[in-house]
Image (spheres, rainbow, N blue to C red):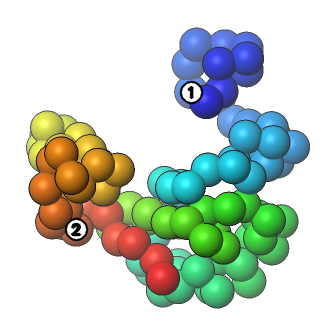
Amino acid sequence: MFADVKGDYHQPLSMEIFYKYGKKCDIMFSFRLSEKDLQSKSDMKKIQPLQSGIRSLNNGRIILNRSILHQSFDKFDEILMEMAALIHPEIFGKPEYKYFLELF
């Protein structure tokens, strides 16, 4: 998705870059906010109004990390399987929602 963004490591993206690519996404994972911060997509629109034009926020899916995620990196395989199930439940089965939460 960000193939033309320079760099090969984790780096912050400007709002312009994020919006350019994110506005067409059907699913967005947000690792900056957790269930402590948000309970719904409308909460997210209030907290981050600049993201209100992103497709996943309006018609797609928003996935947040649960607070347990940051204490569970020894279970990386489980985390990846849950992410895979969130993206492709038809292949990986129904997600357990142990590490992630979907906003509605």
| 10 Å crowding of disc 1: few (<14), some (14-19), many (20+) | few
Residue 63, how many percent across, how many down? 44, 63
Toward the right, the furthest residue is 16
**Labels 2 and 1: the sequence-earlier one:** 1
- Residue receiving disc 1: 10
Name the residue located 68 percent from the left edge and 62 percent from the top edge: 55
- Looking at the rendered image, the quarter that the N terminus falls into is top right
Query: Mark 1: which amino acid?
Result: His
Q: Nearer the viewer, residue 63 or 56?
A: 56
- Spatial CA distance of label 2 from label 1 is 25 Å
Residue 49, how many percent across, how many down? 80, 73
| 10 Å crowding of disc 2: few (<14), some (14-19), many (20+) | some
Q: Is residue 31 left or right of residue 46?
A: left
Against 34, is 46 above or below? Answer: below
Evaluate whether residue 27 shows in this view.
yes
Disc 2 or disc 1, which is closer to the eye?
2
Q: Is residue 55 left or right of residue 33?
A: right
Q: Is residue 78 left or right of residue 5?
A: left
Residue 27, how many percent across, how many down? 51, 55
Name the residue located 35 percent from the left edge and 50 percent from the top edge: 87
- Residue receiving disc 2: 97
Q: Which element carries disc 1, helix, strand or loop? A: loop
Number of labels in the image equals: 2
Q: Nearer the viewer, residue 70 or 23?
A: 23
Name the residue located 58 percent from the left edge and 80 percent from the top edge: 41
Evaluate whether residue 73 shows in this view.
no
